[in-house]
Image (cartoon, rainbow, N blue to C red):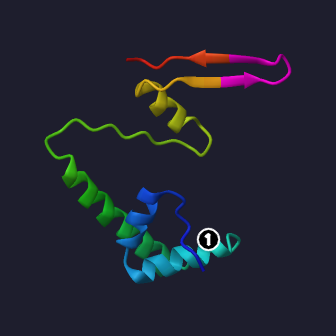
Amino acid sequence: MSAPPDSDEAQRLFAVLPERVQTIIRTRHANQAASLSEDDSLAVLWACIKLGQSRAELVQGKTAVMVIDNTGAGKSTFMNYLLNCTLEMKLLEKEKTVRVRGLR
């Protein structure tokens, strides 16, 4: 069974979770129709809270921004725009490319 995270940073964070929580997440990822027991849900929630607290300590005394929304809502696009990335949208029906420059 492989770990669900798909980025290097996510894999690094996943690796610091307790082994029990990693197993719960792997099992749930392999069978998304399965539901977690109350104990498993609490174990994952507690591990995420602890991980969040440790990550928050890294930015203590600094300005930090958290962007939270549903999957596909545009969080990455929004952050790329803020970080001055050039965004492209290809309109297939008109064979046209629209480029938008970020903020900086």
Q: Is residue 45 left or right of residue 100?
A: left
Seen at 86% across and 21% down, the residue is 93
Q: Is residue 95 left or right of residue 88?
A: right
Residue that mark 1 sits on = 29
Say few, some or many: other residues with alpha carbon within 10 Å of mark 1 (under 14 / 14 to 19 / 20 or more). some
Q: In the image, is residue 74 above or below residue 96? A: below
Pick out the residue farthest to the right. 93
Residue 2: quarter of image: bottom right
Seen at 41% across and 82% down, the residue is 19
Residue 37: quarter of image: bottom right
Residue type (three-letter) at the residue carrying disc 1? His
Which of 43 and 6 lies nearest the eye of the viewer?
Answer: 6
Task: Give the x, y percent position of residue 30.
Answer: 65, 75
Q: In the image, is residue 42 above or below residue 89? A: below
Task: Give the x, y percent position of residue 95.
Answer: 81, 19
Magenta stretch in the rendered image? 89-97
Report the number of numbered marks: 1
Is 94 in the magenta? yes
Question: Which quadrant, please, contains the C terminus?
Answer: top left
Is 17 in the magenta? no
Q: In the image, is residue 11 above or below residue 97? A: below
| Residue 38 is at least partly visible in this image | no
**Residue at disc 1, secondary structure:** helix
Task: Give the x, y percent position of residue 101.
Answer: 50, 17
Seen at 24% across and 60% down, the residue is 54
Which of 62 and 40 lies nearest the eye of the viewer?
Answer: 62
Pick out the residue farthest to the left. 61
Q: In the image, is residue 8 above or below residue 92? A: below
| Residue 55 is at least partly visible in this image | yes
Question: Which quadrant, please, contains the N terminus?
Answer: bottom right
